Amino acid sequence: MLVELRVKNFGIIEDITWSPGEGLNVITGETGAGKSLVIDAVESLLSGRIGDEQIRHQASEANLEGVFYLNPASRLKIAAILAENGLELEDDSLIIRLESKLAGRSVLRLNGSAISRSVLSRLCPYLIDIHGQSEHLSLLNKSFHLDMLDGYAHTAGERTEFARLAGELTCLQRQLSELEKTNREAIRQQEFLRFQADEIEAANLAEGEEENLLSKRQVMASAEKLKNLTHQSLEYLCSGQSGGVLADLNQAMQSLRKISEIDASLKETADEVENAYFSLEENCRSVQNYNRGLDFNPAELEDIENRLALIHSLERKYGRDIPQILAFLAKTKAELDSIIGYAEKTDKLSGAITELKSRLGDMASGLSKHRKEAALSLEKAVQAELADLNMGQVIFKVNFQTQSDENGLPVGGQMLGFTSSGTDIVEFFVSTNPGEPLRPLNKIASTGEISRITLALKSAASRLDDIPVMIFDEIDIGVGGRSGDMLGRKLWKLSQGHQLISVSHLPQIAAYADHHFYVSKTELNGRINSRIARLDSEEHLAELSVMLSGNQTGEKSLENARELLKKASLFKETSPGQPELNMPPSGK
């Protein structure tokens, strides 16, 4: 609730400190004294803006400060918002201060810490609801209509579960989108990857193959020279006229064998020469075999050249040697396998999304059914409240719409768009005069009509609304005494559980005030200054008397004022007791 409002150099207000109380606070005063200026100050504070034209004439700056005491519901929500912005709520109080210099920048602080207007705008719905020509009028924002209906229908639990699953769906859809993007890129590469893999696999490469082919090609290219050298070797080893070295060694071996038979001291030498002979004989056979193998087929050399050309071609594309080419092949095949995996993952995610959409569609259908049932009850309740406010000609309807979306949820054979709140687009419609079509609530031009329709709505669903402070400005425009009494009752009943502030010119409303404030203006040194004062019981009675009969007051007008107070008092006494408003302890 609003504990204190401090206003300095704002309009015709030089310096006031105003402390509204629990329940119904009524502000009255003479025309032009600045009754609505107090509400304008609250609006400017919550908007975080003071226009240069609002700064008091001849003043260089204006200051506004509001001290709020938070109920448990508001405290939790406000603490969460502040935490998101790196701020901490230390206790149940909130001090918002706005300093604005003429033609200069404004400074906005919350509990001493600078904050932005965007953060303040997020806090406002949990602090004050101003009903009048105000940007804070929540019911003119159709996004609040669904919130109110869900509160009235007790569907908050269903909506929360729907929002949770809708969040899961969004997460799955994001994963699918990313996977499909990756998959599309992979599919574009798939044909090229398959070509590369097939080309390498068709070559049937083996590690060490290139070295062997190069060696073989070198031998085949030197075949003539190798043949000549081989013939020479064979001549010296085992051919020629004398049989070559092998024949000579054989003769030496025979002689040494005979010597060793006579003198055993040369037996080891004879054995070694014999071994040398047999080794040389084996080598001669190897050279002969090598010589026979030097008769190459030219087609074989061409095959080697072609094979090497293929290997070199693959090396230019995929790696500097065969091991690198084979490694590239393994990588390519892994990428191809992953593309197949992408398709499997995509199918699995698509199936999960379809299943979750079906579940959400059923939930949205059930949620919509419950809302529409509650909407009928709310319409009747609001119509009854409007009749009490002498607006029985006004028709109130809860308008439901849906939006087709092929990517939405399956509901009743249709594909409907959805948000975290479901598939319903809810907006309050009214017709203010017989024969006029129903129109959105925010299209109504009259401030008084808007305020009274809002009051009817708030009265019908007041137990569901946890906004701690409600301000009604000009709610009694065009209202007479009889309707004013009913309006006063409605305002007082609505103030049970809320702190309610109303600027009024009707004594029938002021009679129901728990706290009556009077705004006056004084002139000092040629300057007009607006003041606000709390009226005690006698002053309260006197002000009602003036409001009833003008400045010409007398015993008759005082008697009429007493009658109003008696009637209001009797109504309060016979109405349900006022609930706890979570007021701060004395002195806080």
Image (tube, helix red, strand yellow):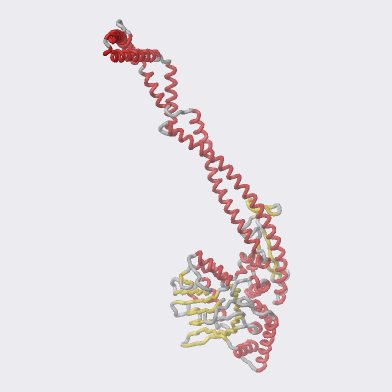
Residue drawn at (46%, 71%) of the image: 113
Looking at the image, which residue sits at the far top? 241
Of the 4 image quadrants, the one containing the N terminus is bottom right
Say if 327 sits above or below 232 in the image: below
Is residue 194 found left or right of 462 in the rendered image?
left
Residue 534, picture quadrant: bottom right
Is residue 339 found left or right of 149 in the rendered image?
left
Residue drawn at (30%, 5%) of the image: 241
Kindly tell me whether residue 244 is visible in this rendering: no
Position in image of residue 382 (x %, y %): 70, 71
Say if 500 sits above or below 162 in the image: below
Residue 436, picture quadrant: bottom right
Say if 223 sits above or below 519 in the image: above
Looking at the image, which residue sits at the far bottom? 555
Kindly tell me whether residue 22 is visible in this rendering: yes
Residue drawn at (58%, 51%) of the image: 172
Is residue 427 found left or right of 294 in the rendered image?
right
Task: Count the marks.
Answer: 0
Position in image of residue 447 (x %, y %): 62, 74
Residue 381, picture quadrant: bottom right
User: Considering depth in this image, is 255 or 514 the residue closer to the camera?
Assistant: 255
User: Considering depth in this image, is 413 or 388 the residue closer to the camera?
Assistant: 413
Position in image of residue 118 (x %, y %): 51, 66
Residue drawn at (52%, 76%) of the image: 67
Position in image of residue 26 (x %, y %): 60, 81
